[in-house]
Amino acid sequence: MPASSSAELFDPSTGGFSTTGAMAEGRVSHTATLLLNGKVLIVGGPDYSGSGARASAELYDPSTGSFSPTGSMNTGRYRHTATRLASGKVLITGGFDGLVGLSSAEMYDPSTGTFTLISEMTCKRLAHTATLLANGKVLITGGSDGHYELGSAAFLATAELFDPSTEKFAITGAMGATRFTHAATLLPSGKVLVTGGLSLNEWVIATTELYDPPTGSFTPSTTMTTRRQLHTMTLLSSGQVMIAGGYGDGGSLASWETYLSK
């Protein structure tokens, strides 16, 4: 089944969706990142024509409702992460190129519309998380080294930090569980909540952990009511975190739950 190139806009004032301009290419497992100029950077995805993964990127302009090409990545990838830094640049990490997991990372500069290769992560990762911390660093957690896509589940418990001042990655404390297709979000306290995912020991898990930047360590937190992977987490204005959907033991989930941050 071909990937879709269509796009829609959600209007909070009406609670409705409307179509907008289509992307130049059909994409799945790509990323969409809001830039400081209000445009949205769309990156990567599988290339079903046979070359593995797309290196191309597009920009969505809300003033015109249209997409236009921007510079291409140095490496085609999907199931990667894209994180806007305080500088306005976008950090792209890891992913899958259709054959192997990737440790490479790139930086997108909106002022030039170009991607530049930077230092590699400490290991290959795909379906990992990347969370911008209050100190400007980026926390990278878990994922797979790529063998999962090839039939051998190699999930990771390791984590690392990206320092934008040096553009290098360094190992930080490891999680208590291996996690793949999990979720992570920054809390008002400055800690990072990591939830669910696939784990080598229990398959889909409901456990959660908190990462504390000052100590560089993870500690167990409240267990979710439902085992979830490929779910979403959204920090609400109340300080609660809404955890929704994903896949559980019996398939797709329509349920949701909230986590009260401390």
Image (tube, rainbow, N blue to C red):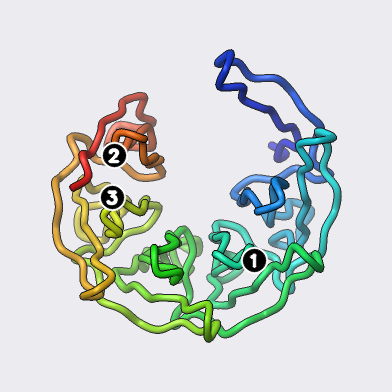
Q: CA distance from mark 3 to mark 2?
A: 17 Å
SS class, disc 2: loop
5 in relation to 256, above or below: below
Instruction: For marks 3 and 2, give the one nearer the viewer.
Output: 2
Left or right: 162 in relation to 188: right
Instruction: For marks 1 and 3, give the one nearer the viewer.
Output: 1
Q: Quick one: 119 or 151, which is closer to the camera?
A: 119
Q: Earlier in the sequence, mark 1 or mark 2?
A: 1
Q: CA distance from mark 1 to mark 2?
A: 27 Å
Location of residue 85 (image quadrant): bottom right
- Find residue 195 and name its label: 3
Residue depicted at 66% across the width and 53% down the height: 35
- Find residue 239 and name its label: 2
The total number of labels drawn is 3
- Measured as percent of width and height from the top left, residue 232 is found at 40, 40
Label 1 is placed on what type of residue? Lys
Q: Quick one: 71 or 176, which is closer to the camera?
A: 71
Residue depicted at 36% across the width and 65% down the height: 142
Label 2 is placed on what type of residue? Gly
Residue depicted at 40% across the width and 52% down the height: 181
115 in relation to 84, above or below: below
Q: Badge 1 local density, few (<14 within 10 Å), some, or many (20+)?
A: some
